[in-house]
Image (tube, rainbow, N blue to C red):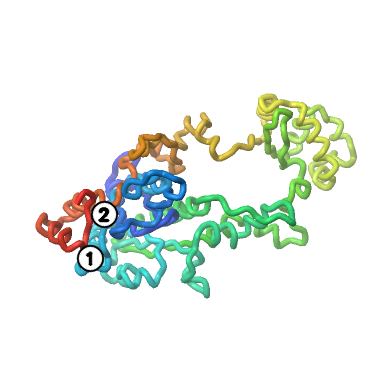
Amino acid sequence: MVNITDIPHQPLAGVVVIDFATHTAGPIISRVLGDWGATVIKVESKEGELSRWSDAGQGMPLEDGNGPSFAVVNVNKRALSIDMKAEGAKEVFYSLLAKANVMCTNMREPALKKLGADWETVHEKFPHLIWARLSGYGEEGAMASEPGFDSVSYFARGGAMLDFCDAKDEYPLPAPLGFGDNVLGITLAGGVSAALVKQARTGQGSKVITNLYANAIWAAGQMLQVSQGDKVSYPRSRFSGTPLNNTYRAKDGGWFLFTAFVPKQYAAVAKALGIEWVLNDSRFETVEKATEHNTELIPIIDEAFAKFTTEEAEKMLTENDVPHGQLRHVKDIVTDQQAKDNHMIFPYTFEPTGREYWLASSPIKFDGTHPQPQNYPAPYLAEHTVEVLKEFGFADDKIEDLLNRKVIFQRGR
């Protein structure tokens, strides 16, 4: 077992993580651990894991399956390729686990048992190892072995898709890409970090698990609570919620959401909009009454807000210290100076085309430093197989034999 090393700003320096995961949520775990200083070895089949080819449908040129969508969840890793069905493959895999601190996976239990990578097998052989797994619906119950994606397990079953749908007669929109996966990955990275404390103290490993559905329920905790009341209090449409936590449009088209539940903020907004009279109207004089008469007050605020340009509305809300946000598209993040100033995104060059993208940074900082730059770009398939095995103590002739027998694979061989 590799001990944690005290390196400033990299709290997980010295920790070795075996990434035995696929798609998005699984690799996100070790992506985050790598950002925090861990050494991450990505173990894949000879074909590579499925997310390597996810950009093919977008017409992206792929070289060894290294596209931008793969990169965002696999920076800070090195890649090793094994044919787990070949004779001698488990010996190689177990040699990695023997010197690692953590194994991360999101494979289903039947597949893990077949490969000898399930918790019971791994824990018996390597009691020091932290075995971290995420699933769609948890380890118990009728759905334990069902496939899970954030679209179906997080958004659909978690309630967000249907409860955020406005018009009753419209089909709900498909879930946004990767939101649940990214939240789940960093959640489990936090659980692994707690298990590393136990490992450092006792030398013992842990089974650390979570699932997409549980995280959807956790994220919807407040909505879940209020949904059990006599009257559902979260908005199902713009006119079913409070006017003081709602969306309004400036005259040049910019949309804003502001929150003015505090009486002082309500008064400041009313004054700034030139509708201070509503504070003396018996229908709207308190926050509670304004909410009760929402269908009457919303059009009044609509008309007043529409007299401001986007720039004027931003200034007005800021000067009155009203919590607000201008509605933006996801694509606007790459030009947002606030995101750049805080290193929430970082530039990444996609080597096959030389095109630069902005990728999302993991959102935790240590000691005031930023989690970038990355130590490693996203790896090509089988890019580091020989390099990694040498570091793990494999002799040159042993590596050559494994390559010749096609147990392992190296890019360029």
Residue at 27 percent of width and 47 percent of height: 5
Badge 2 density bin: few <14, some 14–19, many ≥20, Cα 10 Å: many
Tell me what residue is drawn at x 45 percent, y 51 percent.
186
Q: Does 212 sit left or right of 268 as displayed?
A: left
Per the rendering, the mark at residue 80 is 2
Q: Residue at x 58, y 60 (%)?
A: 217
Give the residue at mark 1. Answer: 89
* Badge 1 density bin: few <14, some 14–19, many ≥20, Cα 10 Å: some
**Quarter of the rendering occupied by the N terminus:** bottom left
Secondary structure of the residue carrying numbered label 1:
helix
- Disc assigned to residue 238: none
Instruction: Tell me residue 352's x, y (percent).
Output: 34, 40
Q: Residue furthest front?
A: 59
274 vs 229: above or below: above
Q: Position of residue 40 (x, y in %)?
A: 31, 51
Pointer 1 or 2: first along the chain: 2
Element carrying mark 2: strand
In the image, is 213 to the left or to the right of 120? right
Q: Is residue 343 above or below residue 219?
A: above
Whether residue 201 is visible here, answered yes or no, is no
Decide which of 180, 70 is in the foreground and name it: 70
Location of residue 293 by image quarter: top right
Image check: 274 left or right of 135?
right
Q: Nearer the viewer, residue 53 or 224?
A: 53
* Type of the residue with mark 2: Leu
Q: Return the x and y of residue 246 as percentages of the image width and height.
A: 72, 41
Residue type pointed to by label 1: Ala
The residue at 56%/50% (across/down) is 176
Q: Is residue 365 visible?
A: yes
Is residue 404 depicted above or below 57 in this figure?
A: below
Q: Position of residue 28 (x, y in %)?
A: 41, 51
